[in-house]
Image (cartoon, rainbow, N blue to C red):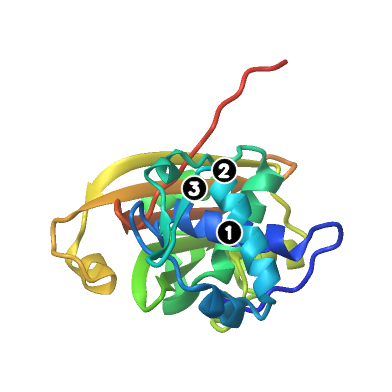
Amino acid sequence: MNAVSRLPGTSLHHQISTLIKDSIAAGGYRPGDRLPTEEKLCELHSVSRVTVRRALKSLEQQGLILRKAGSGTFVSPKASAIAMPTPIAAYLEQVARRRTLSQSVVQEFGFVPASPDVGQSLQLEDGAPVLRVVRVRMMQGQPQVHTTVFLPEDIGRHFKRADFNRQALSELLASQGHHYARIDLITRASLAAPTVAKLLQVAVGSALVDVQRIGYDAQGRPVEYQRLLGPSDRFETHVTLQGEA
């Protein structure tokens, strides 16, 4: 976790509670897990104990944590009901917040010919050059998610390997004027191939959550195709669908 900078119009304790909530949603903390002590949370986020206590009180009121005198603070069984908002801005904001709780390590970076599925997803001809970036997101020293990103050549050529260690994909694309107008997510199950299993530190053939994501700009052009793989106990996606009022 990193030190928190105050966002305009948002209290620090709300930011802290949101970061912890997002970590629970991402599988960093599971129901029954013990949270770090107040002192440790103060150190991790560079905030006062009063701020941490207010954040924990908010989470307790939401039913997401249980505070036991003399034992500590634990994630509530109700925490599995956390929902991820569906508007793009809210979704990307949550992704960015989760990123502050983890570290991305680039494993591979380079241009490759687009395979048929990548070409179809990015609306490119088979074999067209695309930038391929493989990353592993780490949280508290444990691999959480294996991601493979594909970008069209005219977009990918503006980036360096180090960029993907420092910034989220949405931030990198925005820096080049590419903003999401739509994001398609497809979630299914798959089995861990040897290379992925090694990076995620799981057995070959283990069941994984498999999310395929395609981001489109305002003109309807796909600007990124991404595949995310992670063990179900570390990687969760929560979606809430609401009808119109």
| Secondary structure state at the residue bearing disc 3 | loop
* Residue 182 image point, x, y percent: 65, 40
**Where is 104 relative to 114, above or below?**
below
The quadrant of the image that shows the C terminus is: top right
Q: Residue at x 44, y 66 (%)?
A: 35
Q: Which residue is mark 3?
A: 64
State the separation of the CA atoms marked 3 and 2. Answer: 6 Å
> Disc 3 residue type?
Leu
Residue 199 to residue 227: above or below: below
Q: Amino acid at mark 1?
A: Leu
Q: Residue furthest top?
A: 245
In the rendered structure, the answer to whether residue 168 lies left or right of residue 136 reads right
> Which mark, residue 62?
2
Asked if marks 3 and 2 touch (Cβ < 8 Å), the reply is yes
Near-viewer residue (148 or 166): 166
Q: Quick check: 193 above or below 81? A: below
